[in-house]
Amino acid sequence: MIQSGNVGWAIEDPAVIEGMGQIPRHRFVNEAFLDEAIDNHPLPIGCGQPISQAHIVPLMTQELRVSPGARVLEIGTGSDYQATVLAELGVEVYTIGIIGALAETAEAALDELGYTDVHVFNGDGTEGWPEQAPFDAIIVTAAPDHVPPPLLAQRGVGGGMIIPVGPVGACQVLWRITRTGEESYESVSLGGAQFVPLTRQDESP
């Protein structure tokens, strides 16, 4: 079991634990912070963006509840540490990053590490990836102030979404939202969280 000493979240899914063991987090960390790569706090990756704290990636992965062969949309490419963890579970990942330089860096890292089932797109994640929808699950690694409607619509029935919601600097909540019907959803709070804001196209650098 992986236990976060800071917040008490336990990671018990053996597939997630095994997958995390295959991922060198230091490969996705800025060289200046390599000695902190295994510490449980965010680290800068450039362009004002961080790689998530160590415990949040396995937590979100576990709560996504996906099986090998699933198609997952990731919003917020960043370093794409999260996508590699999903790929280790046998998942095909479609990831969208709004900052072009980070999307290019992440794609190069994924190619170097041999993750051929991760597809990177530079664009506005609030619109999702309609050409590839529906997805079995969606994972969002930055916080909007509300759940973008296109993301609700781009999952098949039964598909889950893990998303933090709330303004920066205030209380955010990490949600698991399951699509239970064509127009019905079930939401479960996974607790408080703190993420960078989900940037829209007209707000991007």
Image (cartoon, rainbow, N blue to C red):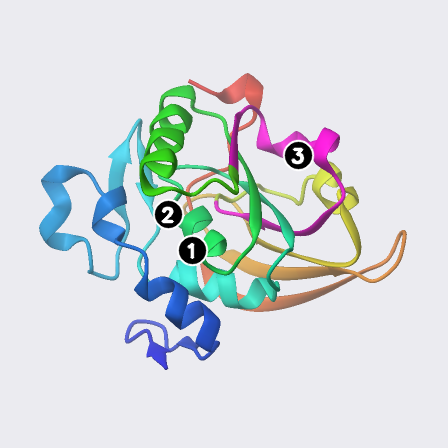
The residue beneath circle 1 is 85
User: Are there few (<14), some (14-19), or many (20+) residues within 10 Å of tag 1?
Assistant: many
C-alpha gap between disc 2 and disc 3: 19 Å
Q: Where is residue 140 in the image (x, y as percent from the top left)?
A: 55, 47
Task: Give the secondary structure at mark 2.
Answer: helix
> Which residue is farthest right?
182
Q: Are marks 1 and 2 in contact (CB under 8 Å)?
A: yes
Q: Between label 1 and label 3, give the one nearer the viewer.
A: 1
Q: Between label 2 and label 3, give the one nearer the viewer.
A: 2
> Label 1 is placed on what type of residue?
Val
The residue beneath circle 3 is 128
Q: Position of residue 188 (x, y in %)?
A: 66, 68
Decide: is 38 above or below 198. below
The residue beneath circle 2 is 81
Please indicate whether residue 57 sits to the left or right of residue 35 in the image: right
Of 203 and 76, the residue lying toward us: 76
The residue lying at 51 percent from left, 68 percent from top is 62
